[in-house]
Image (tube, rainbow, N blue to C red):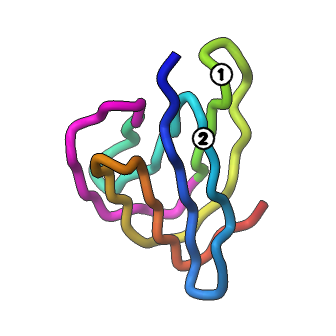
């Protein structure tokens, strides 16, 4: 199983940096899921919950975020949030 490198960053600190199965991001145009190998993509992020799936069959961990940007590139997914709780 391929893993996705995921980072969650706020202006204060690096909140998460880990390998996961999938992350569902609350984009301003709707939620979108990111798996390993996703095409390059950039989106603004609305207030909502990130859903972090550590495995294909597990329950997601949810982290509340407020605003920001998400970028998917060859290195993985980076979410730059104004605030993150969790």
- Residue 36 sits inside the magenta stretch: yes
Q: Foreground residue, 55 or 29? A: 55
Residue beneath the point at 44% across and 59% down: 78
Residue 2: horizontal and vertical position, in percent? 48, 23
Q: Quadrant of residue 17?
A: bottom right
Mark 1 is surrounded, within 10 Å at the Cα level, by few (under 14), some (14 to 19) or many (20 or more) other residues, namely few
The x, y position of residue 58, in whole percent, is 72, 19
State left or right for residue 56 relative to residue 80: right
Q: Is residue 52 above or below residue 26?
A: above
The residue carrying mark 2 is: 19
Q: Is residue 16 magenta?
A: no
User: Which residue range is magenta in the image?
Assistant: 34-48
Q: Residue at x 67, y 30 (%)?
A: 54
Between residue 10 and residue 36, name the one nearer to us. 36
Describe the element under mark 2 as helix, strand or loop: strand
Looking at marks 2 and 1 on the same chain, the residue that comes earlier in the sequence is marked by 2
Q: Give the percent coordinates (x, y) of residue 45.
A: 40, 62
Compared across the picture, whether 67 is left or right of 62 comes to: left
Checking the image for residue 46, the label placed there is none
Query: Looking at the image, which is closer to me, 16 or 65?
Result: 16
Q: Which mark identifies residue 55?
A: 1
Frontmost of labels 2 and 1 is 2
Q: Is residue 70 above or below residue 33?
A: below
Residues packed near mark 2 inside 10 Å, few (<14), some (14 to 19) or many (20 plus): some
C-alpha gap between disc 2 and disc 1: 10 Å
């Amino acid at each position: 199983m391929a893993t996705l490198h995921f980072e969650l960053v706020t202006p204060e600190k690096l909140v998460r940096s880990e390998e996961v199965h999938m992350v569902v991001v609350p984009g301003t145009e709707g939620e979108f899921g990111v798996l390993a190998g996703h095409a390059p993509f950039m989106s603004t992020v609305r207030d909502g919950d990130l859903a972090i799936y550590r495995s294909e069959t597990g329950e997601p961990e949810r982290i509340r975020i407020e605003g920001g940007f998400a970028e998917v590139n060859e290195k993985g997914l980076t979410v730059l949030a104004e605030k993150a709780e969790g």
